[in-house]
Image (tube, rainbow, N blue to C red):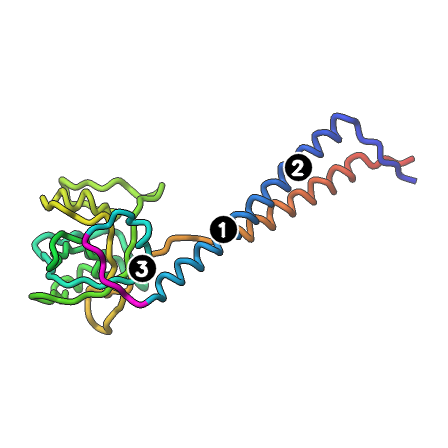
């Protein structure tokens, strides 16, 4: 007959470990609920009909992932290539071009993906155009290198720094991404990067499983043969 007589200290440590692991799992469940709601909100925003982008953006966050329209012309003398960006395994860039609005002001537009080989075939519509895109608020993540404006090396679309490099004033604090791609036309639009992973379910399962395993190990460790 086996008995279970763990020391008090071991019991306390086991309870502490169990509590921490359960807490981590619960936190991931809460993060899962938050992330699911966030992705649903983004999907709802992107499905709304496009509206004209206001001239003044007092609260840029309110326009994140909204479909907007603008009229104006591209300033191709100040193109920015954000690297590295791949498409179907091919290295390339995202081409960002300042857009001078008819109503005034400059908005940085991500016209889409292009490679070195396709650069000579890049489509650059002249004159006044009406464009439709999706608003983003670009942010640098932890693993992205720093931009080097003096060398024109760009790894993330810092619209403020790009505006300063081109000596523009009144640059909007948002990036507008061309929302649709046209077959055979480059830069290829429609390259909306959400970069919002939703792995919290797997993490929650992992922590709850670790909590259960910790208790099984604890029980097996202190079961004694009577």
Q: Nearer the viewer, mark 3 or mark 2?
A: 3
User: How far across and how far down the image is residue 180, in percent?
Assistant: 26, 68
The quadrant of the picture occupied by the C terminus is: top right
Q: Which residue is mark 3?
A: 66
Q: Is residue 161 magenta?
A: no
User: How far across and how far down the image is residue 148, in percent?
Assistant: 19, 40
Question: Circle 3 sits in a helix, a strand or a loop, which is it?
Answer: loop
User: How far across and how far down the image is residue 58, in percent?
Assistant: 25, 47
Q: Which residue is at the front of the view, 64 or 152? A: 64
Above or below residue 22? Residue 86 is: below
Is 78 displayed left or right of 31 in the figure?
left
Which circle's residue, 3 or 1, is located before the other in the chain? 1
The disc placed on residue 34 is: 1
Q: Splitting the image into 4 quarters, where does residue 224 fall?
A: top right
The disc placed on residue 19 is: 2
> What span is in magenta?
49-55
Look at 52% across and 51% down and name the residue there: 32
Q: Which residue is at the front of the view, 122 or 179? A: 179
Look at 69% across and 44% down and name the residue there: 213
Question: Circle 1 sits in a helix, a strand or a loop, which is it?
Answer: helix
Q: Which residue is at the front of the view, 170 or 84? A: 170
Which circle's residue, 3 or 2, is located before the other in the chain? 2
């Amino acid at each position: 007959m086996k008995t279970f007589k763990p020391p008090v200290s071991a019991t306390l440590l086991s309870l502490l470990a169990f509590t921490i692991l359960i807490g981590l799992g619960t936190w991931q469940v809460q993060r899962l609920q938050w992330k699911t709601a966030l992705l649903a909100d983004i999907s709802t925003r992107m499905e709304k009909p496009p509206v004209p982008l206001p001239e003044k953006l007092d609260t840029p966050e309110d326009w994140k992932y909204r479909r907007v329209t603008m009229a104006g012309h591209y300033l191709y003398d100040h193109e920015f290539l954000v690297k590295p960006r791949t498409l179907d395994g091919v290295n390339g860039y995202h081409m960002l071009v300042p857009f001078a609005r008819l109503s005034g002001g400059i908005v940085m537009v991500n016209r889409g993906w292009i490679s070195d080989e396709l650069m000579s075939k890049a489509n650059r519509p002249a004159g006044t155009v009406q464009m439709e895109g999706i608003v983003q608020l670009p942010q640098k993540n932890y693993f992205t290198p720093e931009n080097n404006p003096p060398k024109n090396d760009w790894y993330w679309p810092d619209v403020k720094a790009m505006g300063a490099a081109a000596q523009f004033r009144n640059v909007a604090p948002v990036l507008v991404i061309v929302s649709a791609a046209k077959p055979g036309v480059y830069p290829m639009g429609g390259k909306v990067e959400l970069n919002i992973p939703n792995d919290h379910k797997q993490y929650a399962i992992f922590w709850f499983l670790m909590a259960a395993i910790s208790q099984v190990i604890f029980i097996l460790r202190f079961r004694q043969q009577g």
